[in-house]
Amino acid sequence: MSNIYFTVGPSQAYPTIDKHIQSALKEEIISLNHRGKSFTSLYQSAEERLKELLSIPTEYSVFFLSSGTEGMEKVIQNTVEKYSYHIITGTFGDRFYQTAKELGKVASSYFFNPTEGFRAADVVVPENAELIAFTHNDTSTGMQIPMSEIYAIGKQNPDALIAVDTVSSMPAVDIDYPKVDAVFFSVQKGFGMPAGHGVLIVSPRAIEKAKKLSDAGVNIGSYHNFIHLQKYAQKFQTPDTPNVLGIYLLNKILGDFLELGIHTIRQSTKDKSTMMYDFFKNTDRYSPLVSDIEIRSDTTLVVQVKGGSKDIIENLKKQGIIIGSGYGENKNDHIRIANFPAHTLDDVNHLITALKNM
Ligand SMILES: *Cc1c(COP(=O)(O)O)cnc(C)c1O
């Protein structure tokens, strides 16, 4: 029996993945030379499809990395000489902040308690901040910062670059790219793919900054610094041997998403999250950690469970439904449920029915 994975990442495989893996084997993708014409066509196609699906301006660059976490590191190294500022809404935002400190930057932060809401007016960005780092959807808390708030903070701080971690909200999140400078995600969440592949989208302004830092003798990293990545991306290659199978599968999944249409994907995400939140609202046992609907995640729901979550998780597992436990110290108090394009309306109904019958 196959399980349904509502875990927040890795998560449910996108339904066409089987077929695409089969065709990858048939096309001998595993042995594909990453400097050859077939590979560069593949890179170009994946980049073009991504730009089309997400309405990314042509002058923005698309880089392939190994993970979402690597995205944090590359963004800090390549855009910050000294000062970064971090909006923290959970553990992943804190990871971004710690990454900056580990890289020797002077990082400061503002922490929002997910139960108390998000007020952009509370955010006073230090004047020297070179980068403002956001986690659009913090997977540990299920708090989602409205993009409009991110743009507003960006507008008030025109000299700072804006970075957005969208690892657990892509492709559902709708971004106005000219208002941001770095956006990254990995593929084992919203793309229903095997883990081990990351995507970083950067503005010309971010690349300029990396060049400026490098010229000034600042360490911007080695093979995956923006200058190397850009030099290779211009010929649709990567500095290292990349996850070629990952790029192949991404190109295929992007094709599937384009066929479905981004509007359909986003509307369906909203419909499914509304169904789940409506169910939780009418129970005594469950309450979403984030009560303010403006900042509540559509893609990774975090729900408090009266009496603990352990039995529920185990009971669902017996029925072939795998959901996530709470993050860190909330392991036994919360459940976490992913709502990605791979999760169908039927899957969500199935989950709700199982929870009702418990
Ligand atoms: C999962 C996750 C990451 C880490 O991504 P990896 O691909 O595992 O490195 C970063 N940020 C957020 C918000 C995540 O959910």
Image (cartoon, rainbow, N blue to C red):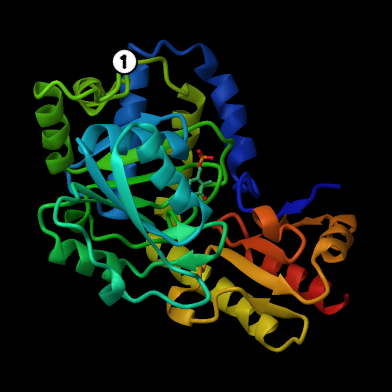
Q: Quadrant of residue 122?
A: bottom left
- In this rendering, the answer to whether 51 lies above or below 174 is above
Asked whether 162 or 102 is in front, the reply is 102
**Residue 81 visible in the shown view:** yes
- Identify which amino acid the numbered label 1 is placed on: Lys
Residue labelled with disc 1: 37
Percent position of residue 86, x then y: 34, 54
Number of numbered discs visible in the structure rendering:
1
Residue drawn at 44 percent across, 30 percent down: 247
Q: Is residue 72 visible?
A: no
Residue drawn at the location 33% of the way across and 43% of the way down: 49
Cβ(mark 1) to ligand 1 < 8 Å? Answer: no
Specify whether 7 is left or right of 116.
Answer: right
Q: Residue at x 52, y 53 (%)?
A: 91
Image location of residue 171, percent across then percent down: 42, 55
Query: 13 or 209, which lies in front?
Result: 209
Residue 329 image point, x, y percent? 68, 56
Q: Residue at x 9, y 30 (%)?
A: 212
